[in-house]
Image (cartoon, grey):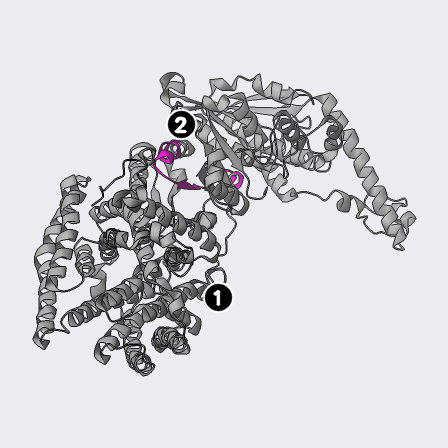
Amino acid sequence: MSPVNSNGLIVNDSPLHHSLTLLLIQLLIIIAFSRVLAVVLRPLRQPRVIAELIGGILLGPSVLGRIPGFLDHVFPESSLPVLEDVATLALLFFLFLIGLELDVNALKTVGPKALVISASGIILPFALAVPVTVCIKGLGLSSVGFGYLYLFTGVAIGITAFPVLARILAETRLLTTDIGQIAMAAAAAGDVVAWCLLALTVAVLNSRNQSPIAGLWILLAGIAFILFMFIFIRPIFRFIAQRNDERGVVSEFSVCLALSLVLVASLLTDIIGIHPIFGAFVAGMMIPHDSAYAVALTSKVEDFIAVTLLPAYFAVSGLKTQIASINSGKAVVAMFVIIFAACFGKIVACTAAACAFKMPFRKSLAIGLLMNSKGLVELIVLNVGLQAGVLDQQLFATFVIMCLVTTFMATPLVMWVYPPARFQKQTLAPAQKLQAVALDHKPVRLLACLYGRNDIPGAVKITELAKGSDQQNLRVHALHLQELSERPSAILTMQRWAGKVSPAFGMTNVGLTFKSFGDLDTKVPVTSSVAISSLTSMHEDITAAAARSQSNVILLPYQPAGAIGRLLDFPGGGLDQITSQTLKTAPCTVALLVNRTEAGPTSSPVISPERSIENGVTRAVMLFFGGPDDREALSLAARIGGHPQVELTVIRFLPSEAWALALQQKAAAKQAEEKQELLARRASQGDSAGEISSGGSPEQNAEGKKPVIEDEVAPAPKAVELKELARRTNLGADDRTASGSSEASAVSVVIDRLQPDKERALDDAALAFLYAEAKRDHSEGRRVRAKFENVELDQQSVWSAVKAIKLHQYNLIVFGRNLVRPPPILTPEDEGATLTRGNSFKLIRDSLSAAASGWTNTDVRPMLGPVADNLFKSGVIEQASLLVVQDSESR
């Protein structure tokens, strides 16, 4: 016998001649095949089980096995027992996870809808199993007894794959809807019945060569095993789970007990004469479903089993599948009959049962389609039948094709019959901007998004600062974002917590940690929920949560992909994609928190104590260039400045007089040119240009008609907003207006500025409001919430002026995103054309973009805007954290 491992190729000892090295090669090939196929099938939203099953068939004699020498060298006959043992061991623990997913207590309270749907989905397929068995026997495709073949066929076409159904529901965003809840409950109840029927079938098959009494003894022993587990073993593990939950830590001994239970239960059922997988399934049901103990066990088992070993089970099944064996008309007829019976029995029965409860037809049909999914559970049944001798190679291949067809069709048909975009579309009501909330003195609603533990310190600190002087003025909803995967734990968490608002996050440690920090530090009321979805659609959960909670601002941690991240994350995915899509679709203001730990592994946490001044006061600076984003950022900074431990400095950047004059002249020339073009266009359409431009007052022409040229060329901005800002801030009360402090003069100043520079007027009003608040703080003897500075800029030294303000003295820098699409890379000949854009804040922004040499769309930071990009390049991010704000209307 050859050694388990080889001595190496150097000494001419081929690894293909040794069991361990050959097993490692086989596993690597199997994993690679399944992962590549999963990527190919991802656009079709197919569960990974489809890719693994197809991969196993490709590796078998149907495709690659036709290559001379492939099976003899890579999958030789002598190696299959070892591979099959490994696959069966993985299957035992996977069935343990399936049992762990089932809520035993919930099965006791299954509603009448789910119970009737589940029963219908079993009864009709078993009824159809009679003609299917007659067809198979009539075509001469099986020599097994009618009763044995009937039992097996009924289980094969009547079973629903619970884990595959959960994955399809999660992918189609139906898991937390009434459809998903009914389908999951019906599938759970049906799975328990199906596994019991499978155990009965195996017991009957194992005793077919013995006396009839032997089968009865096997069945009675199986029932005794189940009773023993529920009466004696389940209370023990309920006690263990309770102790672990109280201590907050799952001990190593507790994990050892659970995993040993799987082995012991599998051994006992095998000794009884029932397949070992039944014991593993029952062992999983012994662990309390809603305990941290169950979550810890799942996290310790699922990745290694599901990623590394379970694909071997599909490969073994593929190696047994010979598509070429379906080489006769009789076999083809049998295949279509089996597929029709499987689809008709499940879809029609479950749809009719749902309709009987007066559910809409589309919903009922969607439930029927979902209940028809087979997947891994079906494959287990088929392998049991092949091992027991009920199926030969031809029938096995026929049933495998049925399994593929029914599982593959589920997702696209459900999306067609009941598309979430049509039936679950939420109206995203526009939320109040931070400026309006500040004017009305209303509480701010903040949605804090968290990917993991590393995001908690920064989110907690910003939440602490954003409450300002009164924690009653802030409401926080924390959203834990989890990537949807094939893991049972992800499906389990999504089923129980997605979309629900609760005092804590239930089973998620991230949420519990954030809640604990919030209780200790912020003293702000915090609600929370979990969103589990694929990376490509996670932004939809964020925007939906913002709409549900009526959030005014979304706090989103910045997650750079980097070169390696962009390579590993496939197109359309990645955390950076979540950020960019959220910025495009958010119904409210978005604040991106760039933790300074992103600068490198040696950086300190966000706003760390060593970066604070005396008495623990945090130094923050607001860089105000102007525009909608900066105005929202200013409102957020004003709240932060109201915190007793924050020293806020607001620095406004303004173009110099010479630069501003040049801009006005070019803007006036551009406006005159557009006016002439409009007049010429009207003249060509038959209007009288002289009539339009004839004498009369500025308000009327010769015929008493009000000219519309000025409005069409330069439409008036939001005059109501400007008047309200001017009224509330008493713009003109300081030395910037020469006409006194009356409200009327303040409004007139604002309106006079409408046409020359509407953005400048809005900027003045926003700053005047904060200036008035600061004056009120001073007059009432409170700490002044902000200091103000102005910095004049010329066209050539924008970034030099920014660097001159010594940003390294601050540990939090707030500014607007102010992103131009596409990002301008200015060259000397382009600068003249850029200056005609009219608004000074755009020109400053463009100059900052020009200063960011080499800034392109492939950079990891273009989504943060030109200011942030320059801060990254200058190294400021290594010493301070950034808060980049985008207004909801500036996308």
Give the percent coordinates (x, y) of residue 466.
42, 33
Residue displayed at 50% across by 63% down:
422
Residue 477 in the figure: left or right of residue 543: left
For disc 1, the neighbor class at 10 Å (few under 14, some 14 to 19, many from 20) is few
Residue situated in front as seen by the camera: 298 or 821? 298
Of the two numbered discs 1 and 2 on the same chain, state the one appearing first in sequence: 1
Label 1: element kind: helix
Is residue 543 visible in the rendered structure shown here? no
Residue displayed at 8% across by 65% down:
224
**Tag 1 residue:** 416
Whether residue 4 appears in magenta in the rendering, the answer is: no
Is residue 554 visible in the rendered structure shown here? yes
Residue 139 in the figure: left or right of residue 228: right
For disc 2, the neighbor class at 10 Å (few under 14, some 14 to 19, many from 20) is many
Q: How far apart are marks 1 and 2 (CA)?
A: 46 Å
The answer to which image quadrant residue 511 occupies is top left
Label 2: element kind: loop
| Quarter of the rendering occupied by the C terminus | top right
Residue 734 in the figure: left or right of residue 70: right
Circle 2: residue type: Val
Residue 606 is tagged as 2
Most extreme residue toward the front, as rendered? 12
In magenta, the rendered stretch is: 435-461
Q: How many labels does the image show?
A: 2
Q: Is residue 738 above or below residue 559?
A: above
Give the percent coordinates (x, y) of residue 650.
54, 25
Residue situated in front as seen by the camera: 87 or 496? 87
